[in-house]
Image: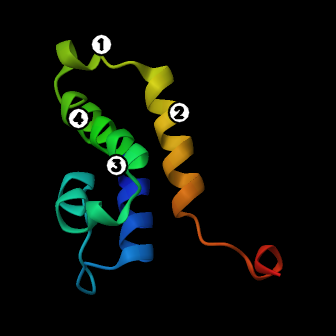
Amino acid sequence: MADEVASLMAARFGGLRRGQQADLESMLRKRGGALPRRLRREARFMAEADRMAGQPKLARQVDFERLARAHRALTGYLRPLGQGSRL
């Protein structure tokens, strides 16, 4: 989920060179200010959960419902509008 949000941030706000793959923490450092405050808080939560997921004991402490809500809110904001939706 965090990788998807990081790639959407890179596509919408830029900040990556061609061929680079971004993680969410670096995208928050580079372009996190472009997000609204509420979504910035959710993105920080996702980055922390992504970091905790690397360790099995800490991964059990992640609130998956809040993680799903944060993912839904961030992808809804970052996904580009289609041509039909813009009209």
**Alpha-carbon neighbours of circle 2 within 10 Å: few (<14), some, or many (≥20)?**
few
* Marks 1 and 2 close (CB-CB < 8 Å): no
Mark 4 and mark 2: Cα distance apart in space: 15 Å
Amino acid found under the numbered disc labelled 3: Arg
* Marks 3 and 1 close (CB-CB < 8 Å): no
- The dot on residue 69 is 2
- Residue 42 shows in the view: yes
Q: Is residue 24 placed above or below 63 in the rendered structure?
A: below
Point out the image quarter for the C terminus: bottom right
Amino acid found under the numbered disc labelled 2: Arg
Point out the image quarter for the N terminus: top left
Residue on which disc 1 sits: 60
Q: Nearer the viewer, mark 3 or mark 2?
A: 3
Which tag, 1 or 4, sits closer to the chain's start?
Answer: 4
Front residue of 59/75: it is 75
For label 3, the SS is helix
Front residue of 4/48: it is 48
Residue on which disc 3 sits: 40
For label 4, the SS is helix
Q: Is residue 11 placed above or below 67 in the rendered structure?
A: below
* Residue 23 position in % (x across, y down): 24, 57
**Alpha-carbon neighbours of circle 1 within 10 Å: few (<14), some, or many (≥20)?**
few
- The dot on residue 3 is none
Residue on which disc 4 sits: 48
For label 2, the SS is helix
Which tag, 4 or 2, sits closer to the chain's start?
Answer: 4
Amino acid found under the numbered disc labelled 1: Arg
Mark 3 and mark 4: Cα distance apart in space: 12 Å
Amino acid found under the numbered disc labelled 4: Glu
